[in-house]
Image (cartoon, rainbow, N blue to C red):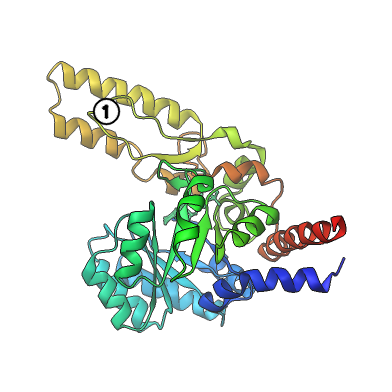
Amino acid sequence: MLNIPAESDFAALQARGAAFLGSEYAIMGGAMSWVSERHLVSAISNAGGFGVIACGSMPPAMLAAEIAATQALTKKPFGVNLITMHPQLDELIQVCLAAKIGHIVLAGGIPPGPALRAVKDGGAKLIAFAPALVLAKRFVKSGVDALVIEGAEAGGHIGPVSLTVLAQEILPHIREVPVFVAGGLGRGEAILSYLEMGAAGAQLGTRFAASAESIAHPRFKEAFIRANARDALPSVQLDERFPVIPVRGLVNEGTKRFMAHQADVLAKFQSGELDKTAAQLSIEHFWAGALRRAVVDGDIESGSVMAGQSVGMVTAIQPVAEILSELKAQAVAALVARGARG
Ligand SMILES: Cc1cc2nc3c(=O)[nH]c(=O)nc-3n(C[C@H](O)[C@H](O)[C@H](O)COP(=O)(O)O)c2cc1C
């Protein structure tokens, strides 16, 4: 049901984030390697959100082609997410600037100074992930234009702290730049509550990965529909001498085999068959290509089915526009119910 005051209240809460992104909703589609390509990114931007291409390990020419193909599908703004460890980060930034990308997200660590300056000098806005308040403050000082705070509930590579805590730690203290919240968000009421705490907007991944426009394999999307929040668990590290980067995804044969693989490598290290470097590399290589196998080939048994705890709120394959209008309707209904309670 249309309720104009509640709708305009919700729009007002999103105004800063929407103005920053140049979109109708202050909702970003979190970049997801192999998933966030031209079709999903343009669908999110065309529906009023803000799509973000996941560059992942793409070389510069491939990124340039993906950007051009996305621009052919939407006239609305969208961003590009680059991983700071990429060996050609500088070239990738130049590709984005040449294509007039207005927003560059630097993920996977602290944005290196030269990369930060290149983005800013090129006239694009820089968005960075802040895993703690001290870093958020440092990023703001160094000229970052917006922050994403991503809780451990999120899908993919995660930090140790939940969004509930990060939001309380960071939102009251960072006013200089817009802050977007991410991780575990599946409903409009939750987005509304973070906007009211001072967030400028939200970033969602899992719900869009299962959307109709996502090119993820049908088996990948079906796994999302079947899964409950408790099925999306972080990868487990067996021995602290051999660190495992925490990645949240659906438990499957692959995650079980990863435990056995770590135990096997550990035994070989202890017997002297493998030295420390070789053992660490063997553990790191276990998941090489595994996300692609799950997303593209539909191997949801041994592939890496990255998903956030929000996967429990994925109940159907829906068009992106329906997901966005559902989120809005839930937020507006919450505001209306509050008004009705007086
Ligand atoms: C399948 C998958 C792949 C992802 N890949 C990336 C990535 O390449 N770069 C990145 O910065 N974040 C990545 N993420 C995190 C998302 O951008 C987003 O922040 C996260 O999904 C938000 O949490 P949610 O899944 O609970 O909505 C990925 C998430 C998923 C589910």
Indicate the quadrant containing the C terminus: top left, top right, bottom left or bottom right. Answer: bottom right
- Percent from the top left, x then y, of residue 6? 78, 68
Q: Is residue 95 above or below residue 283?
A: below
Query: Looking at the image, which residue sits at the far front?
Result: 342
Q: Is mark 1 within 8 Å of ligand 1?
A: no
What residue would you read off at disc 1? 240
**Residue 297 visible in rendering:** no
Toward the viewer: 70 or 234? Answer: 234
Q: Residue at x 40, y 73 (%)?
A: 145
Indicate the quadrant containing the N terminus: top left, top right, bottom left or bottom right. Answer: bottom right
In the image: residue 71, left or right of residue 115? right
Q: Residue at x 57, y 47 (%)?
A: 184
In the image: residue 140, left or right of residue 228? left
Q: Secondary structure at mark 1?
A: loop
* Badge 1 amino acid: Glu
- Percent from the top left, x then y, of residue 78? 50, 74
Toward the viewer: 188 or 298? Answer: 188
Q: Residue at x 24, y 64 (%)?
A: 112
**Residue 304 visible in rendering:** yes
Q: Is residue 338 above or below residue 17?
A: above
Q: Residue at x 31, y 69 (%)?
A: 141
In the image: residue 291, left or right of residue 194? left
In the image: residue 33, left or right of residue 59? right
- Percent from the top left, x then y, of residue 129? 40, 58
The crowding category of the residue bearing disc 1, from other C-alpha atoms within 10 Å (few below 14, some 14 to 19, many at least 20), is few
